[in-house]
Amino acid sequence: RASQDGYPLLQRVLVSFGTEVAFERNLSDALAKVLGASVSSEDDPDKDKDKETTAEQRLTKALADADAALKASEEALAEGDFAAYGEAQDDLRDAVDRAIEAQRQIARTTDEVEPLPETSPAPEESPSAEAPLDAGTPAPDAVPAPEASVSVAPAA
């Protein structure tokens, strides 16, 4: 039902992610409960400036740096600037190393992620001896990821 003011008033937020569900007074609290972590509010962007970066943040930064270094490397090679190419390759190696380390830290803190192996050549692919999947069984890569949804409950 509509309130006397003529517009709905946000009372609670319902958030679901996979099998996790939260029903809280605001979106930040609901997300924090579902994700099992604190979510910073947009109201105070300086609130987390002094906090240390998380492994997930370091991984994201390292991957962005690797992408930028790869692009710089390709540009330098196209221009024949081998000094710049070498520097870009050094930057790329550094970014990849930081990404691997951040992923290992994430793997140590969660049971869901396998740690990355030490850098080594990939083994040759061998034919699979497994039986083909039943027509009614979806392939492992066809199983959808959990979906997230947010619902807002108006005032009664």
Image (cartoon, rainbow, N blue to C red):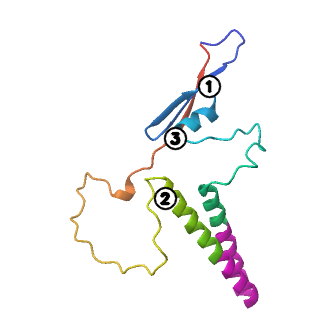
Is 62 one of the magenta-colored residues? no
Give the residue at mark 3.
148
Magenta segment boundaries in residue numbering = 65-92
Kindly state the secondary structure of the residue where label 1 is placed: loop
Amino acid type indicated by mark 2: Ala
Could you tell me which residue is drawn at 48 percent across and 33 percent down?
21
Could you tell me which residue is drawn at 60 percent across and 57 percent down?
55
Residue 147: % across, % down: 48, 43
Residue 150: % across, % down: 56, 34
Quarter of the figure that contains the C terminus: top right
- Choose between 79 and 126: the one closer to the eye: 126
Amino acid type indicated by mark 3: Ala
Q: Earlier in the sequence, mark 3 or mark 1?
A: 1
Question: Residue 80: in sight, yes or no?
Answer: no
Give the residue at mark 1.
25
Residue 12: % across, % down: 60, 24
Q: Earlier in the sequence, mark 2 or mark 3?
A: 2
**Alpha carbon separation for disc pair 3 and 1:** 18 Å
Tell me the crowding category of disc 2: few under 14, some 14 to 19, or many 20 or more residues within 10 angstroms, Cα based: some
Could you tell me which residue is drawn at 58 percent across and 63 percent down?
102
Residue sticking out furthest to the top: 4
Question: Residue 95: in sight, yes or no?
Answer: yes
Give the residue at mark 2.
107
Kindly state the secondary structure of the residue where label 2 is placed: helix
Left or right: residue 111 versus residue 76 is left
Could you tell me which residue is drawn at 66 percent across and 11 percent down?
3
**Alpha carbon separation for disc pair 2 and 3:** 23 Å
Quarter of the figure that contains the N terminus: top right
Q: Earlier in the sequence, mark 1 or mark 2?
A: 1
